[in-house]
Image: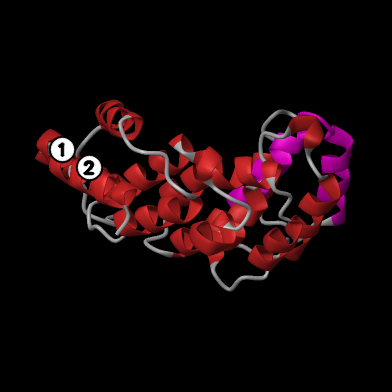
């Protein structure tokens, strides 16, 4: 175990439970459909704690960052997965071009629910696919049998505005256009709605060409009034 991993795990497992609240934990678990137990630590409190711990930590290598995230992921309470995500975001400059394939792909497929999958998108997938073009990896995620990895691929360009690779986005959306799982349809709709802010015509054309799209995807795509 590296010095970085030992420090992060010892500090977070020692300090985070001190902030626990049973009432908050019960409500959070119910809201998240009991995907995992919770300590009951609200976002502002835990993020303040995590920031203090991360600021005092040595800078990790990419592999140390990934292994530490995996170790936090294995702990029971959901806040430890949130700690892993916040840690990745804090040390994102340490992540190398293999980090998504070597570590984030694993995290996406474990204890999967929208909260961790979408947060990993913001913390790791979005910035790293800009820094390290990952078209081949996103295509492999598109073909994955895991719905949550599909969702991550569908959403990986959200927020890029005029820098969106529309051809790649439509290639990914086309591969899932006949899917009716709620979390896939929602992701498709959000991706299209993002694109409509910069290329409304392209979105209209895609919707017209794909009448098989789930109504949830269509409704989300049209929420800006287009």
Q: Is residue 197 magenta?
A: yes
Residue under label 1, please give it. Answer: 15
Q: Measured from the top left, where is residue 55 in percent x and y?
A: 34, 29
Q: Residue at x 12, y 36 (%)?
A: 21
Q: Residue at x 58, y 54 (%)?
A: 152
Residue 157 in view in this figure: no
Q: Measured from the top left, where is residue 30 in percent x and y?
A: 25, 48
Q: Measured from the top left, where is residue 4 in percent x and y?
A: 33, 47
- Lateral position of residue 223 relative to residue 108, left or right: right
Residue extent of the magenta highlight? 185-209
Residue under label 2, please give it. Answer: 12
| Among the 4 quarters of the image, the one containing residue 24 | top left
Count of numbered badges drawn on the protein? 2
Mark 1 burial class by Cα count in 10 Å: few <14, some 14-19, many 20+? some
Residue 81 in view in this figure: yes
Q: Residue at x 17, y 45 (%)?
A: 26
Dots 2 and 1: beta carbons under 8 Å?
A: yes
Q: Which image quarter holds the N terminus?
A: bottom left
Q: Which image quarter holds the C terminus?
A: top right
Could you tell me what secondary structure mostly forms the magenta stretch? helix
């Amino acid at each position: 175990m590296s010095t970085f991993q030992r420090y992060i795990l010892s500090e977070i497992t020692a300090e985070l439970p001190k902030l626990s609240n049973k009432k908050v934990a019960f409500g959070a678990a119910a809201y998240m459909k009991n995907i995992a137990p919770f300590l009951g630590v609200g976002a502002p409190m835990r993020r303040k704690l995590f920031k203090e711990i991360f600021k005092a930590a040595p800078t990790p290598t990419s592999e140390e960052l990934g292994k530490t995230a995996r170790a936090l992921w294995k702990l029971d309470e959901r806040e430890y997965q949130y700690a892993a995500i916040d840690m990745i975001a804090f040390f994102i400059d340490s992540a190398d071009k293999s980090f998504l394939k070597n570590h984030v792909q694993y995290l996406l497929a474990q204890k999967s629910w929208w909260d961790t999958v979408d947060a990993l998108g913001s913390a790791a997938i979005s910035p790293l696919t800009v820094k390290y073009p990952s078209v081949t990896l996103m295509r492999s995620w598109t073909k994955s049998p895991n719905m949550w990895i599909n969702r991550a691929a569908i959403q990986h360009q959200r927020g890029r505005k005029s820098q969106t690779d529309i051809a790649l986005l439509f290639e990914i959306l086309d591969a899932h256009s006949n899917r009716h799982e709620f979390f896939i349809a929602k992701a498709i709709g959000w991706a299209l709605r993002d694109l409509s802010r910069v290329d409304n015509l392209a979105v209209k054309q895609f919707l017209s060409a794909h009448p098989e799209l789930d109504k949830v995807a269509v409704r989300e795509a049209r929420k800006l009034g287009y």
